[in-house]
Image (cartoon, grey):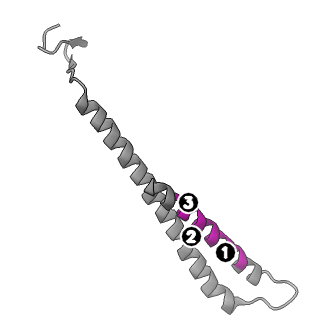
Amino acid sequence: MRFWVREIAGWLLVLLGVYMLIGCYSLLANVNNQSRILEAGPLAFIGFIVFRGGIHLLKVAMAARVCLHAQAVQKEQSSGPRQVTLRDPRAGRYTGPTGRP
């Protein structure tokens, strides 16, 4: 459940970063008044950092989800009876647990 909080926070940060970069573009592309280059520089840097932070949270949330899934699969495989199926690469057929066809 913790990875859902990270994923939601990551998406919010990504959207906030995009919004900040759009604001930066609107400062630079202001055709009616003077373009505000000095104000747009720090805003672009901050927007980029916020955007990258959101992407990082999304990556961490996905890694947590994959790890939980791998643990569940591993627990399921270790709890059941273990059946070994060996494949003889020379014969091209499957052999039983003793190695004989």
Based on the picture, tell me whether residue 18 belongs to the magenta stretch. Answer: yes
Q: Which residue is mark 3?
A: 8
Q: Which residue is mark 1?
A: 21
Q: Residue at x 70, y 89 (%)?
A: 37
Q: Quadrant of residue 98?
A: top left
In this rendering, the answer to whether 68 lies above or below 5 is above
Please report contact status of discs 1 and 2: CB closer than 8 Å, yes or no: yes
Please report contact status of discs 3 and 2: CB closer than 8 Å, yes or no: no
Q: Earlier in the sequence, mark 1 or mark 2?
A: 1
For numbered disc 1, what is the local secondary structure?
Answer: helix
Q: What span is in magenta?
A: 7-23
Based on the picture, tell me whether residue 57 belongs to the magenta stretch. Answer: no
Give the x, y percent position of residue 59: 46, 58
Q: In the image, what residue type sits under mark 2?
A: Phe
Please report contact status of discs 1 and 3: CB closer than 8 Å, yes or no: no
Label 1, residues with CA under 10 Å away: few <14, some 14-19, many ≥20: many
Question: Closer to us: mark 1 or mark 3?
Answer: 3
Q: Which residue is mark 2?
A: 51
Q: Quadrant of residue 48?
A: bottom right
Label 3, residues with CA under 10 Å away: few <14, some 14-19, many ≥20: some
Q: Earlier in the sequence, mark 3 or mark 2?
A: 3
